[in-house]
Image: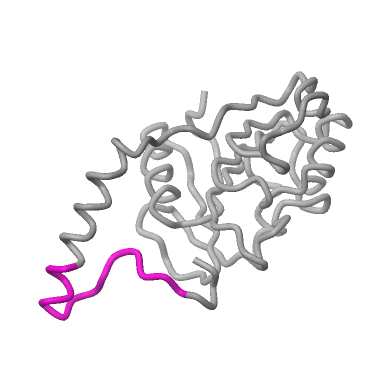
């Protein structure tokens, strides 16, 4: 049960924020980790990515929902995995390259963490015979949550909202920051 646990959500975009909302249903204490430590309304507290090493040892669940950029490649590596408790569950729903796969395999083999749930892997697709396929404490799911039929209405609705915001000189949704990489 998630009830009463502590979770960190790395990444505070749309998906990360919805996950935070869902975690609160289970009375989970949620910490958001983002590039800039500006408060996230859906989190109990927000810290910058540089604070990740200090908070990982206190989490029951670590959920990775960040964008993959040069700065976030292997954001979860050997040091981060070693800092987690042996009963921590690691979840990656974002991009495989955010986690150092070799370090994850080693951590699971040494029982440094309780388990991993991976909706994405690096490499992807995970080749036949890869050690993660045989790892008993690793759940691998296909990254196939959306179809064009599902996303098309959402994209059109965002375009409509952004056109209205643009006409009213209001803030736009989903603005891309080329320097940040997303």
Q: Is 12 above or below relative to 172? A: above
- Closest to the observer: 11 or 157? 157
Residue sitting farthest toward the bottom: 169
- Closest to the observer: 123 or 134? 123
User: How far across and how far down the image is residue 167, in percent?
Assistant: 11, 76
Residue 174 falls in which quadrant of the image?
A: bottom left
User: How far across and how far down the image is residue 49, in percent?
Assistant: 61, 64
Q: Tell me the residue at 63%/31% (across/down).
A: 117
Is 149 included in the stretch rendered in magenta? Answer: no
- Closest to the observer: 78 or 160? 160
Q: Tell me the residue at 16%/68% (across/down).
A: 163
User: How far across and how far down the image is residue 26, in percent?
Assistant: 41, 31
Q: Which residues are magenta?
A: 163-177
Residue 151 shown left or right of residue 44 in the figure: left
User: How far across and how far down the image is residue 118, in percent?
Assistant: 63, 34
Residue 22 falls in which quadrant of the image?
A: top left
Q: Is 10 above or below relative to 106? A: below
Residue 35 shown left or right of residue 175 in the figure: right
Residue 178 shown left or right of residue 55 in the figure: left
**Magenta stretch, main secondary structure class:** loop
Q: Tell me the residue at 81%/29% (across/down).
A: 130
Is 167 included in the stretch rendered in magenta? Answer: yes
């Amino acid at each position: 049960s998630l009830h009463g646990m502590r979770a960190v959500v790395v990444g505070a975009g749309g998906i990360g924020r919805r996950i935070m909302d869902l975690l609160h249903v289970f009375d989970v204490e949620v910490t958001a980790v983002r590039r800039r430590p500006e408060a996230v309304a859906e989190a109990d507290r927000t810290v910058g990515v540089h604070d990740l090493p200090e908070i990982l040892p206190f989490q029951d669940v670590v959920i990775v929902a960040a964008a993959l950029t040069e700065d976030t490649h292997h954001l979860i590596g050997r040091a981060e995995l070693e800092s987690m408790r042996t009963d921590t569950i690691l979840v990656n729903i974002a991009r495989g390259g955010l986690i150092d796969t070799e370090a994850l395999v080693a951590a699971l083999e040494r029982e440094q963490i309780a388990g991993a749930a991976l909706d994405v892997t690096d490499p992807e697709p995970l080749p036949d015979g890869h050690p993660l396929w045989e790892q008993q404490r690793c759940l691998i799911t296909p990254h196939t949550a959306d179809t064009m039929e599902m996303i098309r209405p959402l994209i059109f609705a965002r375009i409509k909202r952004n056109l209205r915001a643009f006409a009213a000189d209001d803030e736009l949704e989903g603005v891309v920051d080329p320097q940040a990489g997303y």
